[in-house]
Amino acid sequence: MTALLLWLSVATGAGGLAIAASATRLLLAERRLEARLSARLARAPRRSDALPARLPQGLAGAAALIGARQWSQLLAARRAREITAEFPFLLDLMLMMLQSGVALDQCFRAIARDEVVALPRHSRQMALLVADLDRGMDYEPALDRWAARLAIPGAQELAALFRQGLFQGVELTPALREFAREFAQRRIARAREAMGSVTVRMVVLMILFLMPALFVVLAGPPVTAIFDTLQAGAR
């Protein structure tokens, strides 16, 4: 390569010298780049060596992610069960307040202020609803936020019922009484479904664990007697 550059410089004169110098600089830059790449490849760990080192970290991260997700789901399910358990008492309490002539806004404020012990979950959510109303938020978005925070079956329907009573002039007392009756019927239906699923699971468990032991107890003596008879006949 160097001899070729010298021949070009001699053959082309002064212009060849400039071309040769440029080519020499390019050649040196290429060699420096190759040296840097070789050094980086030599310093970089092989994939076969890096994979076992990173495998425990990846497994630990995946286990932490799955554990956190499961824990959050358990907490969400527990919160939903507690709110659902308090919901019928909330309906009965609001129905009594409305029947006694208390306005709907005053029902919200009374529950948020006075029912912390009887309705700990719903009183906290009612306090957030009252805070939204005190900040100047309209009833419609405030009730939508309240129902979304509850996140249980029946919350959206109850919020729609409150909106109808506030904006369309629907009488809340008979409508709320009917809603409470329908909600109680739905709870009974869900309880019956849960009981049916428990019965099926119990039957499966009995078949898996009790029936083999029962077969051993019932069929063990006859089978033993048969073997004894066969052995006696063979003698």
Image (tube, grey):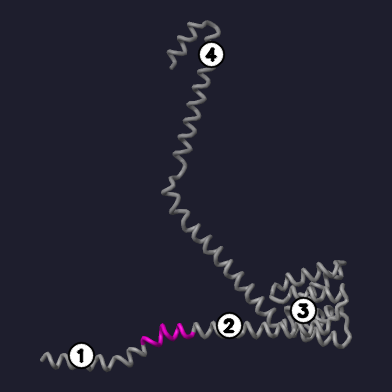
Q: Which mark is residue 227?
A: 1
Q: Which residues are magenta?
A: 202-212
Q: Is residue 104 left or right of residue 91?
A: right
Name above or below for residue 23 compared with residue 152.
Answer: above
Alpha carbon separation for disc pair 4 and 2: 89 Å
N-terminal-most mark, 3 or 2: 3
| Amino acid type at image mark 3 | Ser
Q: Is residue 119 left or right of residue 44?
A: right
**Contact (CB < 8 A) between labels 1 and 2?**
no
**Mark 4, mark 2: which one is toward the viewer?**
2
Q: Which mark is residue 123?
A: 3
Does residue 33 belong to the magenta stretch? Answer: no
Q: Is residue 78 left or right of residue 160?
A: left
Which residue is painted at 43% across and 13% down in the image?
3
| Amino acid type at image mark 1 | Phe
Residue sitting nearer the eye, 28 or 157: 157
Alpha carbon separation for disc pair 4 and 1: 106 Å
Identify residue for label 2: 194
Residue sitting nearer the eye, 165 or 2: 165
Instruction: Tell me where residue 151 appears, x and y as whole percent.
Output: 70, 72
> How packed is label 2: few (under 14 Cα within 10 Å), some, or many (20 or more)?
few
> How packed is label 4: few (under 14 Cα within 10 Å), some, or many (20 or more)?
some
Which residue is painted at 70% across and 85% down in the image?
184
Q: Quadrant of residue 107?
A: bottom right
Alpha carbon separation for disc pair 3 and 1: 73 Å
Instruction: Tell me where residue 42 appears, x and y as whole percent.
Output: 44, 39
